[in-house]
Amino acid sequence: MEATAKERDSCSGGGAGRRECAICERARAEAVAAGARPRRPHLRGVHSLTPSELRVARLAAEGRSNREIAQALFITAKTVADHLGSSYSKLDITSRQQLTTALELSTA
């Protein structure tokens, strides 16, 4: 299946907020069927967070410390810090104080 020049030029490649072209949708479906784990289509915002990042972010937003989060989820404090760092980047925030607002705005 060969894409036309117009389809190649107009294809968003699955970017956030854009509709994927038929070729991209088919390629993604075939890759998943073959066992691949393609990138998430959302690169920013709460929908871009992995399930683990979201669990950690919600606990941090409740005011728990990294150590408390690590103990509650049976992970290391380093993993908590890594998940929070990724979450801050995806939510476009710089501090723990902004986390509650970012999560609330994303679910509203």
Image (cartoon, rainbow, N blue to C red):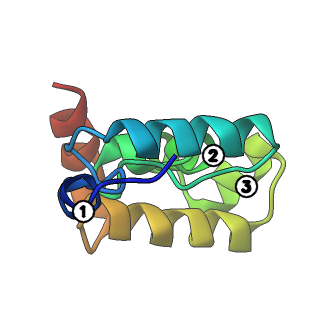
* SS at circle 2: helix
**Residue drawn where x is 22% and y is 48% of the image:** 102
Earlier-in-chain disc, 1 versus 3: 1
Pinpoint residue 34: horizontal percent, then vertical percent: 81, 42
**Residue drawn where x is 84% and y is 48% of the image:** 74
Pinpoint residue 25: horizontal percent, then vertical percent: 46, 37
Q: Residue furthest top?
A: 108
Q: Please, what is the three-letter code of the amino acid marked with disc 2?
A: Ser
Q: Which mark is residue 5?
A: 1
Q: Please, what is the three-letter code of the amino acid marked with disc 3?
A: Ala
* Front: mark 2 or 3: 2
Q: Please, what is the three-letter code of the amino acid marked with disc 1?
A: Ala
The answer to whether one can see residue 61 in this image is no
How many residues crowd around disc 2 within 10 Å: few (fewer than 14), some, or many (20 or more)?
Answer: few
- In the rendered view, tell whether residue 85 sits above or below residue 75: below
The CA distance from mark 1 to mark 2 is 40 Å
Q: Nearer the viewer, residue 97 or 17?
A: 17
